Image (tube, rainbow, N blue to C red):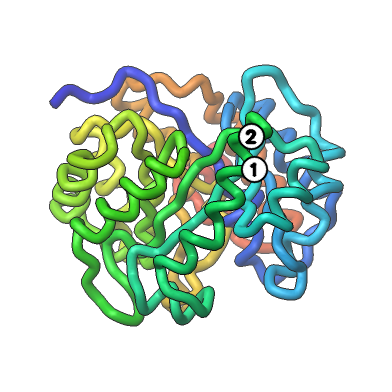
Amino acid sequence: MTLPQKVRLVDVGPRDGLQNEAQPISVQAKVRLVDDLSAAGVNHIEVGSFVSPKWVPQMAGSAEVFAGIQQRPGVSYSALTPNLQGFEAALAAGVHEVAVFAAASEAFSQRNINCSIADSINRFTPVLEAALAAGVRVRGYISCVLGCPYQGDVTADQVALIAQELSAMGCYEVSLGDTIGTGTPGATRHLIEVVAGQVPRDRLAGHFHDTYGQALANIYASLLEGVSVFDSSVAGLGGCPYAKGATGNVASEDVLYMLNGLGIETGIDLDLLVDAGARISQVLGRENGSRVARARLAAR
């Protein structure tokens, strides 16, 4: 299969990235990060999460972040809303796109959200109904698609079943998440082939963590399978809570550098993206998680 001519990168750094950082982050710093990303040409940014600050303290103030950002035309600014209360808060904050999530692993679902996969899907059925009624687009995430920290292997058929369910409920796109980063290119291609039997490739996205150093290889494998949407995190923000000291999200700069080398269009300026990652890394007092950014910054 030929590679896609164009790819959409969804930068999840302000949500999936920052929620795993130990350092407290001000609303002002979050706003600056989102504005830096949109200025760099990122046209889909996951800004925050409307969940209880008791469970995810780093996502407190998401409504204030949405109020503070400069919303550029043609850019999707989305939020995670795991329940109806969260969705209503997001709607009040003027959010036009939300995301819901399910796990492909029964053990992961039980350990992380204290319910079965079926129950978790039932919980956000009202979110889908309310969103569709309000004209708000909904994106679906599936975690642990290529392995689970508790049960090990996860079958592609199980992932396909959940993807089909999310799609039928009204999710315009389903993001397949290798949460613990253990997937390899062969397993990735097999997964997409199986899932594409239920949900078309142009409605699938890839979300690869780099814990085992396989994220870019898995993205390339997905490109070969006709997937053209990928989640990534500027400066590789976020850790992996299941592997101590391991990296989490693949860095947006590294993905963009590879896509540029393949002649694939994204509309994103690499230098401005590197600047955005450098600034938030400085705020957090942490090393930049992007190899491309570290190389580019050292060469300046």
Q: Position of residue 200 (x, y in %)?
A: 27, 33
Question: Left or right of 294: which side holds 225?
Answer: left
Three-letter code, disc 2: Ala
Mark 1 to mark 2 CA distance (whole Å): 5 Å
Residue at x 37% of width, y 20% of height: 6
Question: Left or right of 298: which side holds 173?
Answer: left
Image quadrant occupied by the N terminus: top left
Q: Position of residue 141 (x, y in %)?
A: 45, 51
Residue at x 76% of width, y 27% of height: 71
Image quadrant occupied by the C terminus: top right
Residue at x 41% of width, y 19% of height: 265
| Badge 2 element | helix
Q: Quadrant of residue 135?
A: top right
Q: Which residue is mark 2?
A: 133
Mark 2: give few (<14), some (14-19) or many (20+) Cα within 10 Å. few
Against 142, residue 174 (above or below) is above
Number of marks in picture:
2
Q: Quadrant of residue 19?
A: bottom right
Residue 234 visible, this angle: no
Three-letter code, disc 1: Ala
Q: Position of residue 197 (x, y in %)?
A: 18, 40
Residue at x 23% of width, y 46% of height: 195
Mark 1: give few (<14), some (14-19) or many (20+) Cα within 10 Å. some
* Viewer-proximal residue among 283 and 228: 228
Per the rendering, the mark at residue 277 is: none
Q: Which residue is mark 1?
A: 130
**Residues at marks 1 and 2 touching, judged by CB atoms closer than 8 Å:** yes
Against 74, residue 220 (above or below) is below
Q: Position of residue 189 (x, y in %)?
A: 17, 46
* Viewer-proximal residue among 246 and 112: 112
